[in-house]
Image: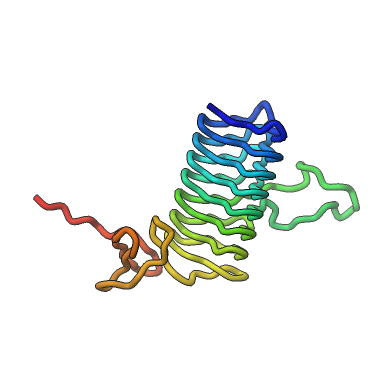
Amino acid sequence: MVRIAASADVDERATIGAGSSVWHLAQVREDAVVGENCTLGRGAYVGPGVRLGDSCKLQNYALVYEPAVLEDGVFVGPAAVLTNDVYPRAVTVDGRLKTEDDWDAVGVTVRTGASIGARAVCVAPVTIGRWATVAAGAVVTRDVPDFALVAGVPARRIRWVGRAGVPLEEADGGWVCPQTGERYAEADGVLTPAEVAVTP
């Protein structure tokens, strides 16, 4: 079952997956695809052709502009913005109001499990890696590696985080999640889950 609040504006050409909720004053534009079991909070905006995977959460007033792609399990905090114009202008050089034909939209890609904090801005085109976390208020101007915690303006990596979102701790030459016990290895600025030994 899909729940759509009476005050929400969902275009008839949009697709909303089973179990998803679109709350008050949210807008989902034409040809957008929202996966299953997603939550779009009050006043959230999903632009034309945007793709959301399953189990995504857009908090109140999050703005996701086309052609963004969010994979499964992505969190976008309140009032966060995913932009789509590298050189924004309202008018052309001759003073004419710009239309869709006057610019090429570029999107933000957010990989599986990543989180974007409240009022963060992701300036397209950038990719937010798997299970990464963008701190509240950060401005992302370059790609974010998998499992990175980035903060600041412009955003820079300050820690590593695991799938639980908790900062990792150094242990035995690698990294461990204090909440789950999952281990990770770092090489050349890239963090990956450590191989699990298989007992014969």
From this view, report whether residue 32 is shown above or below residue 171: above
Residue 197 picture location, percent across and down: 18, 56
Query: Quadrant of residue 88 in the image?
Result: bottom right
- In the rendered structure, the answer to whether residue 20 lies left or right of residue 65 reads left
What is the image's colouring?
rainbow
Point 50% across, 34% down: residue: 36
Total numbered labels placed on residues in the image: 0
- In the rendered structure, the answer to whether residue 135 lies left or right of residue 173 reads right
Query: Quadrant of residue 195 in the image?
Result: bottom left
- In the rendered structure, the answer to whether residue 186 lies left or right of residue 34 reads left
Residue 162 picture location, percent across and down: 39, 60
Point 32% across, 72% down: residue: 170
Query: Quadrant of residue 187 in the image?
Result: bottom left
From this view, report whether residue 111 is shown above or below residue 37: below
From this view, report whether residue 86 is shown above or below residue 53: below
Point 49% across, 44% down: residue: 71
Residue 101 picture location, percent across and down: 77, 42
Taking depth in this image into account, of 53 and 189 the one nearest to the observer is: 53
Point 70% across, 53% down: residue: 85
